[in-house]
Image (tube, rainbow, N blue to C red):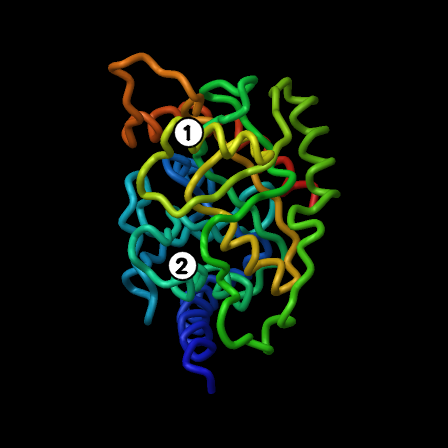
């Protein structure tokens, strides 16, 4: 067996074993970005599986990422939430960055919800705003480079609609009903770990993105490779513009604080959207 596939099934079998004792079969996977892990606190009757206990699993080292799977009930469904993701900038190869997504699909999820903290390069975006991701631009190495894992999907998967149009439409309706303003835009993913320069922010805006971050795209590619519908949302945690005061700096701790402040609004949209599935 391909050692990459063996690693995926070994990790998934461990998780299935833990969940079997509880009678849990997750149908929705959720990936929580920087400062957004508090959504996991809303999951009822949670079973917590630290990444470090899963065979062959990477450990999250980023600020605001606790490094746990939280499995329980949200929106009337059994969900499997990643309380912290794995990033390419942490030094992991793409195989490991995307391992958790593949594992969640093998465990049984039918939908993937992704979230992130992002800089708003669109001048109309402000700190605390929510953006439904309608498309993305990836400047991170593609996780499907290398020998294709035919067990999971085709060599050349279609990415015409990486984010499910039906889920986007439902989310927009839910946000309107709840009185939660949302943007709908394009997410740009770079490698990090540096924040972008003002010239890079201008470039990212010029090529058509509305928000920028360091994640999400690899996991979405893997989910689509495995034919799992995806819904994505960014929390705008800083205004990524071209001109700043001479003493301005981007600060990772500030990003987490801003994400936490907006997490309740995002949680409402996610919960009601999961209820609708």
SS state under label 2: helix
Judging depth in this view, the residue of 141 and 214 nearest the camera is: 141
- Locate residue 88, reporting x and y percent: 37, 54
Mark 1 closeness class: few <14, some 14–19, many ≥20 residues within 10 Å: few
- The residue to which callout 2 is attached is 97
Outermost residue, top side: 245
* Dot in front, 2 or 1: 1
Decide if residue 258 is on the left or right side of residue 226: left
* Residue 271 seen in the figure: no
- Locate residue 242, reporting x and y percent: 43, 21
Which residue does the image show at 47% across and 68% down from the upper left? 20
The circle drawn on residue 38 is none
Between discs 2 and 1, the one toward the N terminus: 2
Judging depth in this view, the residue of 123 and 100 nearest the camera is: 123
Which residue does the image show at 59% across and 77% down from the upper left? 151
Decide if residue 76 is on the left or right side of residue 240: right
Mark 2 closeness class: few <14, some 14–19, many ≥20 residues within 10 Å: many
Which residue does the image show at 45% across and 60% down from the upper left? 98
Q: Quadrant of residue 21?
A: bottom left
Q: CA distance from mark 2 to mark 1?
A: 28 Å
Looking at the rendered structure, the number of numbered marks drawn on it comes to 2
- Locate residue 9, reporting x and y percent: 46, 75
- The residue to which callout 1 is attached is 199
Q: Is residue 194 above or below residue 27?
A: above
Which residue does the image show at 69% across and 22% down from the upper left? 176
């Amino acid at each position: 067996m391909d050692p990459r596939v063996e690693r995926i099934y070994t990790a998934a079998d461990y998780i299935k074993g833990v969940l079997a004792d509880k009678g849990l079969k997750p149908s929705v996977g959720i990936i929580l970005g920087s400062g957004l892990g508090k959504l996991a606190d809303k999951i009822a009757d949670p079973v917590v599986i630290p990444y470090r206990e899963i065979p062959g699993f990477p450990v999250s080292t980023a600020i605001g990422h606790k490094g746990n799977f939280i499995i329980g009930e949200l929106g009337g469904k059994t969900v499997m939430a990643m309380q912290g993701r794995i990033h390419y900038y942490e030094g992991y190869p793409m195989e490991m960055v995307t391992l958790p997504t593949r594992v969640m699909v093998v465990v049984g999820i039918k939908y993937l919800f992704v979230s992130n903290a992002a800089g708003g390069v669109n001048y109309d975006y402000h700190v605390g705003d929510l953006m439904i991701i309608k498309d993305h631009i990836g400047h991170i190495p593609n996780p499907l480079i290398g020998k294709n894992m035919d067990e999971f999907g085709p060599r050349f998967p279609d990415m015409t609609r990486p984010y499910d149009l039906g889920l986007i439409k439902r989310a927009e309706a839910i946000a309107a009903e709840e009185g939660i303003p949302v943007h709908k835009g394009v997410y740009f993913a770079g490698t990090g770990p540096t924040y972008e320069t003002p010239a890079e922010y201008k470039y990212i805006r010029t090529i058509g993105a509305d928000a920028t971050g360091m994640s999400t795209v690899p996991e979405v590619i893997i989910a689509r490779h495995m034919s799992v519908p995806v819904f994505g949302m960014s929390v705008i945690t800083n205004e990524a513009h071209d001109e700043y005061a001479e003493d301005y700096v981007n600060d990772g701790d500030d990003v987490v604080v801003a994400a936490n402040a907006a997490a309740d609004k995002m949680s409402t949209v996610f919960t009601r959207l999961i209820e609708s599935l």
